[in-house]
Amino acid sequence: MKRTPLYERYSTYPGVKLIDFGGWELPVQFETGILGEHEAVRTKAGLFDVSHMGECLVSGEEADRYLDYLCTNSIADMQVGQCRYTMMCYPNGTVVDDLLIYRRTESSFLVVMNASNIEKDLAWIKTDNPHAGVCPQVVDLSDATVQLALQGPLAVQILEQFISDCDAIKSFTFRSQCEIGEVMALVSRTGYTGEDGFELYCAADDGPLLWDTLLEAGKPFGLIPCGLGSRDTLRMEAKLPLYGHEISDTITPLEANLGVFVKLDKQDFCGKEALLAQQEHGVPRTLRGIEMLDKAVPRNAYRVFLGDTDIGYVTSGNKSPTLGIFCAYVMIERREDLKFGSLVEVEIHGQRKRAKLVRTPFYKRGMKSE
């Protein structure tokens, strides 16, 4: 299995549990456990190693126009120092991957990709998309880069010890050259937890020192290392999509209710024609939230029923550590007889369990715990 440059740091931590995550040996939890890590991020701060994520640099005079074609969101109008969430779509409108795009200079962009999609994304960007003939320079930086996520309401206070005005880094903006102790890092006000926080990128060789530096500085604030388990429960509560679940090569952004990141008024982008047609003829499916009325955990791929009719499936589900409820996101038929409060059933181990449609996200920043 692949390992990040931080493996040697945390593989011997007491209580750490390592798992195979898409070919990567990564911590699912540390000594505090998933629930403790989840609570720490909601109330104090947590530090995640997300160096399995991929990064590439796209540069050239036409790099902005090229990425603008590949992405559903607007890229050409981004300012230097800005980052933006977007998706890449196939011509049929389904999703290649969701990305974060950082505009480093007028002619260069850092593209952050999901770990499971790195090879596919690079091939799509460089050779497989319909406009690949005018592809600018693309350099894969994945193996050379460490990415850490410092997340939680006390993240600003922790980072202020190194960047005194870090609170001036606004949401979805970044600074390229920041001194974190002895390490130079790119720091962005982004994250995948529903809380305030920062993501930090540095050279792979500097990763272990950056990890140690942040954990030591965060001790007085209750900062703890966090694994993939709490990252998933945190993102699910906040309705942050996971590739292969809420979005995939069989799901369009419109079906996933991510239309705000699809700029159909752009002159052109890959998948636009298909998405316009889907919008015109009616989006057939929709991503909705459910709360279980019967005590049961609705897992990915469990079928959802309205009466005797199979109307869809669970994309992600769990017990919310913050709210104490069993909840899930479901991809279901768009129907006039389904409204908030409507009752549906989830088939779990051969038995139908009752649930109701509810508004999402389940958690918004500042909500009180159970």
Image (cartoon, rainbow, N blue to C red):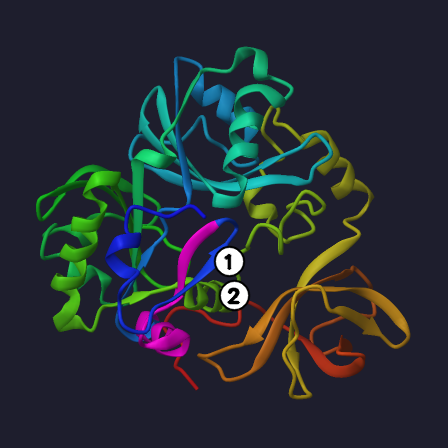
Determine whether 334 is above or below 343 in the image.
above
> Looking at the image, which residue is at 31% across and 38% down?
145
Q: Are marks 1 and 2 in contact (CB under 8 Å)?
A: yes
Using the rendered image of the protein, determine whether residue 203 is visible from the camera's viewpoint.
no
For the residue pair 272 and 48, the one nearer the viewer reads as 48
Rendering quarter of residue 42: bottom left
Q: Secondary structure at mark 1?
A: loop
For the residue pair 316 and 363, the one nearer the viewer reads as 316
Q: CA distance from mark 1 to mark 2?
A: 6 Å
Measuring from the top left, give residue 283's x and y in whole percent: 76, 49
Rendering quarter of residue 182: top left
Rendering quarter of residue 220: bottom left
Q: Which residues are magenta?
A: 24-41
Is 27 included in the stretch rendered in magenta?
Answer: yes
> Looking at the image, which residue is at 44% across and 69% down?
364
Classify the position of the C terminus by image quarter.
Answer: bottom left
Q: Is residue 277 left or right of residue 213?
A: right
In the image, what residue type sits under mark 2? Met
> Looking at the image, which residue is at 41% across and 74% down?
34
Disc 1 target residue:
240
In the image, what residue type sits under mark 1? Leu
Is 288 included in the stretch rendered in magenta?
Answer: no
Determine whether 136 is above or below 86 in the image.
above
Disc 2 target residue:
236
